[in-house]
Structure formats: C-alpha cells, structure tokens
C-alpha cells in the first residue's frame, strides 16, 4: 500500500519503543515502514551533550527529504505511496519536508509533535495531516491547536483522553497506532 518514514523526536532514535510499536501496527495493516536515525552517531553524541541539533528542524527535514528521495528510487518502493510519521520535533521536520516535497507525500501523522516549529512551512503543506496529542499534554496540545489552525490542507487534530506527552497510560499508544494506521490506509496511494 505504501511506506511510512519515521522522523524521531529530540533525544530519540530508531530504537524508540513507542515508534517501534506504531511501526509494527502499521506493518500489520499492510504498510511498510522505515525507521532510521536523522542524526548519525557522532552528531547524536554531540546533541546529547549540547542539545544543539535536536531543534534544528531545517537539518532534520533535509535528512528526511534525502531519505524520501532514496526510498522513492528503490526498486521495491518506487511505486509506493509515501507518508511520514513524526514524533516530538520529528513532527515539525515531517511537516517541513512535506512542504518541500509537495503532493508526492500522501499523508503526515504527528504524535505529540511540535508542528509550531515548522513555522512558515505550515501554510505550504499540501499533504493530509493528522495531529495526535495527549489530553494531559496541555502545552503541546495548545501548540498543536494553533498549528492546526494555520494548516490549509486536509487536517485533523485528535486528542487522546487521559494521555500525557509520551502516551504511557494504558491503551493510549494503541489508540495512537490505530489512528495512524487508519489515516495512512485512507491516504496512501500507490504511484
């Protein structure tokens, strides 16, 4: 059906148990996934010490665009629909990358993301966007509401009852995964 590239958030990696859980759910729904690190080990080490790269949304988005071009040129996936799943600052990177690439990105899902950090790219996003936020993640919820108002594409904001930023409460991550799978199943289109 398609492939979803994961953009991890600040201080996270392709080994994130939350993103791995969502990726497994997407795979069970017939959607391929690509989990990779936006920062190589030497940059990750620097960022762990200084925090200087985790909010460099432009850099993270450029890396996501490069990975997208790579996946679009692979024999196994060149005809696949492409989507993004971003978490935390990865949500902003996914939106900036989607704005740059345009309609070739079929859908974007952000979990506990910081779409506000996408700044002026928000108005340029053409892909359908699903923003998922925990009800008890009050600051991030308000940032998502403001960003959602700025998006001019098809969009939806889902608030998960009782959830905090990391969706650690029973059943909340399962709800995130279900919503993401439904969104991608509806929007991913083979080339």
Image (cartoon, grey):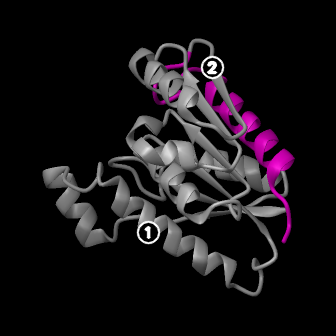
| Residue 112 vertical position relative to residue 36 in the rendered view, above or below | above
From the image, which quarter does the C terminus lie in? bottom right
> Label 1, on which residue?
63
How crowded pointer 1 is (Cα within 10 Å; few <14, some 14-19, many 20+) is rated as some
Res 162 quadrant in image: top right
Residue furthest toward the bottom?
Answer: 75
Drawn side of residue 66 relative to residue 25, left or right? left
Are circles 2 and 1 on residues that touch, CB within 8 Å?
no
Q: Is residue 110 left or right of residue 114?
A: right
In this rendering, the label closer to the viewer, 2 or 1: 1
Quarter assignment of residue 59: bottom left
Q: Is residue 186 magenta?
A: yes
Which one is in front, 71 or 127? 127
Say above or below: 83 vs 34: above
Residue receiving disc 2:
160
SS for tag 1?
Answer: helix
In the foreground, 174 or 65 = 65
User: Which residue is found at the position 43% from the left and 67% from the top?
Assistant: 62
Label 2 and label 1: CA atoms lie apart by: 30 Å
- Which is more toward the observer, 103 or 39? 103
Q: Position of residue 177 (x, y in %)?
A: 69, 38
Seen from the viewer's position, the closer of residues 156 and 178 is: 156
Residue visible at 25% across and 67% down? 43
In the picture, measured across the screen, residue 65 lies left or right of residue 105, that is left
Give how far across and how far down residue 145 sits, in percent.
Answer: 53, 22
Residue at horizontal 70%, vertical 65%?
Answer: 104
Return the x and y of residue 139 as percentages of the image width and height.
Answer: 39, 19
Tell me if residue 127 is in the magenta stretch.
no
For the N terminus, the image quarter is: bottom right
SS of the residue under disc 2: strand
Query: What range of the chain is rendered magenta?
Result: 163-191
Residue at 48% x, 54% y is 96
């Amino acid at each position: 059906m398609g492939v979803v590239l994961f953009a991890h958030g600040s201080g996270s990696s392709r080994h994130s148990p939350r993103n791995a859980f969502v990726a497994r759910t997407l795979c069970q729904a017939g959607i391929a996934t690509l989990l990779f690190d936006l920062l190589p080990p030497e940059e990750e080490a620097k960022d762990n010490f200084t925090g200087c790269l985790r909010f460099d949304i432009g850099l993270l988005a450029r890396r996501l665009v490069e990975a997208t071009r790579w996946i679009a040129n692979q024999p196994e996936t060149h005809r696949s629909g492409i989507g993004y799943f971003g978490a935390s600052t990865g949500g902003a990177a996914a939106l900036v990358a989607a704005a740059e690439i345009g309609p070739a990105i079929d859908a974007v899902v952000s979990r506990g993301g910081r779409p506000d950090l996408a700044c002026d790219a928000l108005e340029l996003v053409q892909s359908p966007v699903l923003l998922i936020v925990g009800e008890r993640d009050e600051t991030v919820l308000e940032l998502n509401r403001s960003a959602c108002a700025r998006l001019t594409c098809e969009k939806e904001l889902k608030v998960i009852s009782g959830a905090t930023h990391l969706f650690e409460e029973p059943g909340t991550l399962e709800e995130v995964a279900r919503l993401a799978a439904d969104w991608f199943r509806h929007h991913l289109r083979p080339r």
